[in-house]
Amino acid sequence: MDTQRKDQRVKLSRYVGIYDQQTSRLVGHVVNLSKSGLMITGHRAFNEGQKFSFWTENELNERLPFDAVSRWNSKSNDHFNNTGFEFVALPKKTKATFSRYL
């Protein structure tokens, strides 16, 4: 897994919720982030290779949309699902916000 990553991931020290664009339901929280993707932990299992449309919020409570493809999924010891995603489309404002976390 690590050998396939293009960019180093940074573990976030702040709470960043990720929401489904269609339902606006919380799907999980960002565990770590890189320029090319992120890892989400939550109760939902995501199918590998599937494209998802998400959004998060910045400090001004603005919605920041993005698309990502799930690359792997594993169950953690605390019964949460950890899923690695690769970004497909990152709008400028979303990219700028994520860059501040790195």
Image (cartoon, grey):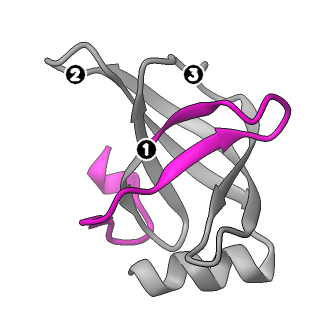
Relative to residue 36, is residue 13 drawn left or right?
A: left
10 Å neighbourhood of mark 2: few (<14), some, or many (≥20)?
few
The type of residue carrying mark 2 is Ser
Residue at point 28%, 52% (across, down): 2
Residue 16 is a magenta residue: yes
Q: Earlier in the sequence, mark 2 or mark 3?
A: 3
Which segment is the magenta one?
1-29
Q: Which mark is residue 46?
A: 3
Check if mark 2's residue and mark 3's residue have beta carbons within 8 Å.
no
Residue 24 position within the rendered picture, expressed as x and y whole percent measured from the top left: 75, 36
Tell us which disc is closer to us: 1 or 3.
1
Q: Give me the C-alpha separation between circle 1 and circle 2.
A: 14 Å
The type of residue carrying mark 3 is Phe
Check the image and name the residue furthest to the right.
Answer: 22
- Per the image, the residue denoted by label 1 is 29
Q: Could you say whether the residue bearing mark 2 is in a helix, strand or loop? A: loop
